[in-house]
Image: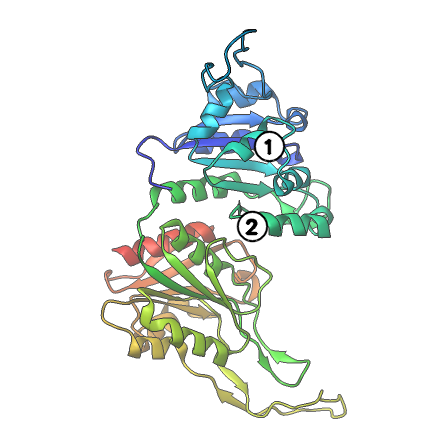
Amino acid sequence: MTQPSHKPRVLLGITGSVAAYKAVDLIQKLKPLVEVKVVLTDAGSKLVPLKALEKASGSPVWTSLFKGSTPIAPGTPSGSHPLAVVPHIEYAKSADLVLIAPTTADFLAKLSVGMADDLLSTLCLYATCPIWVAPAMNVKMWNHPAVVQNAATLRSRGVRFLGPESGHLACGEVGDGRFAEPSEIAGQVQSYFENFNRWAGKKVLVTAGPTQEPIDPVRVISNHSSGKMGYALAQAALNRGAEVVLVTGPTRLTPPVGVTVVKVKTASEMHRQVMKHLPKMNVMVMAAAVADYRVKSISPIKIKKSQDELSLRLVKNSDILGEVLKKRKPTQKVVGFAAETDHLCENASAKWKRKPSDLLVANQVGGKQSAFENDQNELLVFSRKRAKPVVLKKDFKSKLAEKILDLLDE
């Protein structure tokens, strides 16, 4: 796909999720950024007023495959009728992105098997542009094996998933399945079109998540890192057209479609993979929460709870960021991270002096301010190009990732 010369065209599909009412807010946030045409499924029409969508989009909302079509007169020779018999099909042909938000379990199933029993599913088969989905459903539905398999199938075909997020659901339950915030979705759309091919030709390595240092065959030393910041940075680099390698410790996250994923567990494994890929990279983003120490002698069998106290002898792991900074080429850029529980500015500044990366991104963790599992964060960024650290106020990690890469581009 090439960068569109016109205002980007987004075909927004709205399906029958309870979150459909948020589509009006989503349209309002998308309109300043892109041209929006709305397709509403029959189930979706039961949950959000057609007139509200038309008022928000400023255009008619399409609900039927044949409404507004030009009938073919009897006796018309085959092949002599114009292509645009169905105007919606013509728009799907010229769309730069199909965004289905919210997306139900039912529609994920349709997409995965290629059904075309309504307007939206037909347009998805016809469109040649990228397709993004923003699932919204009950946590049990999202975790059902059939839905999990359908999602995996779609990801393997390049369909991008925006969420779902974890939190309180409309049914009263808590868990995965919450519709991504409209501002978050609009921000991803904006990033996709604004940064398209900005980093084309660049190779980027991102580390993410925690590491696990074994104690015995069943126990490990680890930390609370969720990997969300690292995964957001990998997605942000992809949005800019970069070729991305994601070296990730154990997480519950699904890697962005299009990255090369290298899974590791220990700090030693992460160190080995980072140094292996370093010579080929243009940018190194070291966002993983790597364990500083490992157990010197790992027990070959499970340690029994037979003593009141147990001592473990720990030894230092390799300093991955420090080694990257020593061995990088002058043209390679490096982003380091510092997670601090106290005196954020002072401790992060001291680390930056020891390890002068192009950027050092610091954040507060632990206690009520812990940002590990949250979808939002606030950061302090030290930059070689700035006399003072930059404060990035609380925002979604996806947006913070874009701001970090913008600072790296300065």
**In this picture, is 228 found above or below 57?**
below
* Residue position marked by numbered label 1 in the rendering: 121
**In this picture, is 95 found above or below 348?**
above
Q: Position of residue 375 (x, y in %)?
A: 53, 53
* Residue position marked by numbered label 2 in the rendering: 155
Q: In which image quadrant can residue 312 be found? A: bottom right
The colour scheme of the drawn protein is rainbow
The residue drawn where x is 46% and y is 55% is 232
Q: Position of residue 264 (x, y in %)?
A: 53, 73
**In this picture, is 324 found above or below 190?**
below
What amino acid type should be assigned to the residue bearing mark 1? Ser
Mark 2 or mark 1, earlier in chain: 1
What amino acid type should be assigned to the residue bearing mark 2? Arg
Q: Nearer the viewer, residue 30 or 14?
A: 14
Q: In which image quadrant can residue 329 be found? A: bottom left
Q: Nearer the viewer, residue 286 or 77?
A: 77
In the image, is 302 to the left or to the right of 279? right
**In this picture, is 159 found above or below 59?**
below
Q: Nearer the viewer, residue 268 or 78?
A: 78
Q: Taking the image as drawn, is residue 393 in sight?
A: no
